[in-house]
Image (spheres, helix red, strand yellow):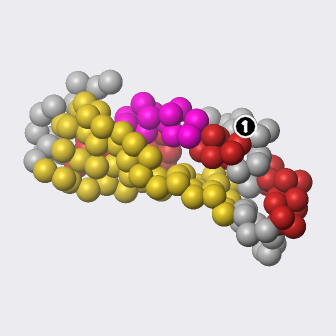
Amino acid sequence: MSENYKIISKFIKDISSETPNVETYLYVKDYISKYQMNIEIKSKALKTQIIEINTILKFHDNSESKKKSYFELTYATIIKLEKEIKEKKVLEKIILCDVQKEMYSEMEGALLSLLKMSGFPDIKFEKKVDFEELYNKKFN
């Protein structure tokens, strides 16, 4: 929790698991360790001082293989800014870093549940996402 914002609501906005057939499932079961996670963050102002942040987690295979499963979760977080923020950099850090750090374990848990319910119960994400590092690389 930051003195700059307060989370007023959070929810799964969209969730998707696609495995076209049994042959693909059996193939993916052996190769899912090669899958990678991509994270996209989008935001839009809803009202004065209220922002919707959509974090999209995509877990997919980047190879040329025709047999693929695809998993995607869009997690919406609604925040209220506690004070007017004039500096774009401060707002970017809240959206791209601070809120993400606060919400990520919940989002990751939802994605892991989706994978488990999709027939891949042994998936674990070994590497934790360092939003501070990603933010600093992008803006410094």
The answer to whether 75 appears left or right of 35 in the picture is left
Q: Residues within 10 Å of mark 1 (few under 14, many from 20)?
A: few
The answer to whether 136 appears left or right of 78 in the picture is right
Give the residue at x 50% y 34%. Answer: 106
What amino acid is labelled 1 in the image? Lys
Visible in this render: residue 94? no
User: What residue range appears in magenta?
Assistant: 96-110
- Is 31 magenta? The answer is no
Give the residue at x 36% y 39%. Answer: 10
In the rendered image, the vertical position of residue 6 relative to residue 29, given as above or below: above
Visible in this render: residue 43? yes
Image x and y of residue 37, in percent: 63, 52
Q: Nearer the viewer, residue 105 or 23?
A: 23
Q: Nearer the viewer, residue 95 or 61?
A: 61
Image x and y of residue 75, in percent: 44, 47
- Is 104 magenta? The answer is yes
In the rendered image, the vertical position of residue 64 relative to residue 103, given as above or below: below
Give the residue at x 16% y 31%. Answer: 82
Q: Which residue matches tag 1?
A: 124
The answer to whether 30 appears left or right of 18 in the picture is right
Main secondary structure of the magenta stretch: helix
